[in-house]
Image: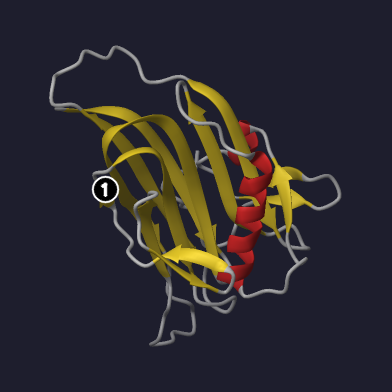
Amino acid sequence: MAGIWFTHTLAKTAPNGSAWAKKDVYFPEMQVFATATLSAYRTQTPERFSSYQTGWAEAYIVTPRTPMTAGAGWSFPSVRDNQVFPRTDRLTFWLQVANGSGANPPVSASAVGVIYEYEFEPKLRLDLPRSVRELHLAVYAEDGTVVGTHSSTQLEGGPAFDDDQTREQLLTEAYAVSGRARSSFQIAELRPDEMAQSADFRVDPSTGRAEPLNIQGSDQHPFRS
């Protein structure tokens, strides 16, 4: 019998190339069934129509059992599953969005990740597991444009995560996905309310704090409040 044990919403807009949002979840080892569902996708045709448009979005899950391929200094999943059924103590929900290039209109998407506790014996659960530690990061370019966001959550009884290792991995992913030179990105640690699931934002390079951002073409984002 499976019951909902954890859920999280990801949302991202790509105004210039690729962007992503990801969520690491650490929990007591158990048999789980997890899903990542692309719940909304929004783009628009430019005024001067081009027959070739490269905008896309993808939601998937990575676990310690996911086959990985090494390249560009980064190990990336060779299989992108949106449903997994492992016995594990951690997994990552991914949402990747791309508009092709800065010449194309922005692409916005959202996804929902759900972890079900899979038990052969029915178990009564009256509440969801408690979070004991969280880390919220944004990787941004020199002008404050946020290319990726990362949140880590350690649930009660789950293994601890390493903050420094998480930051290093986030930068490695940013350089590999963007193809930009190293040292061109910075990382900001933000409060949970600064990384609201329903809003696009930039980081002020002078303060390292988040600022609301209304990206043209994404004003009807399905999760924007």
In front: 19, or 93? 93
Locate residue 103 relative to residue 31 in the image: left or right: right
Tell me residue 183's x, y (percent).
Answer: 77, 66
Of all residues, the one furthest to the bottom in this rendering is 51
Question: Does dot 1 land on a helix, a strand or a loop?
Answer: strand
Where does the N terminus fall, quadrant-wise? top left
Q: Which kind of residue does numbered mark 1 sit on?
A: Val
Question: Does the image show residue 219?
Answer: no
Q: Tell me if residue 102 comes above or below residue 205 in the rendering.
A: below
Q: Looking at the image, is 210 positioned above or below residue 205? A: above
Residue 11 image point, x, y percent:
47, 49
Q: Residue at x 79, y 45 (%)?
A: 208
Give x and y (percent) for residue 174.
61, 63
**Dot 1: within a 10 Å radius of its alpha carbon, few (fewer than 14), some, or many (20 or more) residues?**
some
Q: Nearer the viewer, residue 199 or 21?
A: 21
Farthest right residue in view:
206
Picture quarter containing residue 123? top left
Residue 196 percent across, percent down from the top left: 56, 38
Q: Is residue 37 visible?
A: yes
Q: Is 145 placed left or right of 119 in the picture?
A: right
Q: State how the image is colored.
A: secondary structure
Task: Classify residue 89 as left or right of residue 98.
Answer: left
- Asked whether, in this view, residue 101 is left or right of residue 120, the answer is right
Report the residue at 59% width, 55% height from top.
Answer: 148
Q: Which residue is mark 1?
A: 84
Kindly indicate the quadrant of the structure image that contains residue 212: top right
